[in-house]
Amino acid sequence: MATTNAEKSISKQSASGFPIPAIPSSSIIATDAHPNIQVQNIVCSVNLSCPLNLTDINNRLRLSEYNPKRFPGAVLRLLEPKVTALAFASGKMVVCGARHETLASLGARKFARILQKIGYNVCLKDFKINNMLGTSDLKFPVRLEDLNESHPQFSRFEPELFPALIYRLVRPRTVVLIFVNGKVVITGGKSREELQLALDTMYPILRSFRKS
């Protein structure tokens, strides 16, 4: 069945409430030591290869929610690993909440087994990681106004709307949120290596705008 707009949009995480134009990638790469990235959330998708009766699933599973007037998918939860799935009638499923790739895959397989036990002919296909979110702490404050003025083609900073400066990279294609206290959130990567590369790219730039 065709993928709905809800299915497409739920597998992506937006870094801001407004669009950011595409910009060229930064060519600066870090050469000194800096904090590592910590993965906080992985969003993945999988095809269960069979249609789902979401009302039936909601009635038969304890850790589930389904209100089609509010959202077209059923929300399913696992306690171990602690992940959440959004299941759609088409058989598509999005799994989020894991902090490691193996736990994301394990969660998808556990959801599949649960659905098999209640009579659905599930066969996992097309598992892929759509988005990873990571955080880091620079351990120093950043002059966000100066950074925004010096890198207008890369950044957007509107503190009256959002407290972080939004810095967009193309290589790797990620969005970096920089807070004045030095906390950093990176989203949009497909692997922890991409998140780390984004941090490697940003670190010397941010260090040059360290607030004394």
Image (cartoon, helix red, strand yellow):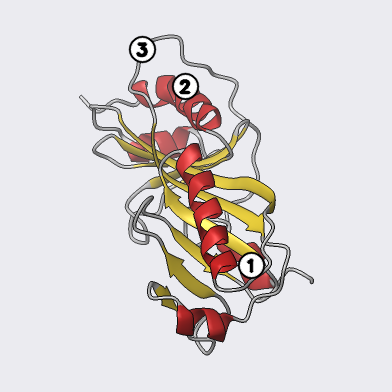
Q: Secondary structure at mark 1?
A: helix
Residue 201 percent location from the top left of the image: 50, 23
- Labelled disc at residue 33: 3
Q: Which residue is mark 2?
A: 200
Mark 1 is surrounded, within 10 Å at the Cα level, by few (under 14), some (14 to 19) or many (20 or more) other residues, namely many
Residue closest to the far left: 212
Residue closest to the far right: 1
Q: Which residue type carries mark 1?
A: Glu
Residue that appears at 52% across and 51% down: 43
The front one of 99 and 141 is: 99
Quadrant containing the C terminus in the rendered view: top left
Report the mark closest to the observer, 1 or 2: 1
Vertically, is 11 above or below 150?
Answer: below
The span from disc 1 to disc 3 (Cα, nearest Å) is 40 Å
The span from disc 3 to disc 2 (Cα, nearest Å) is 9 Å
Q: Which residue is mark 1?
A: 7
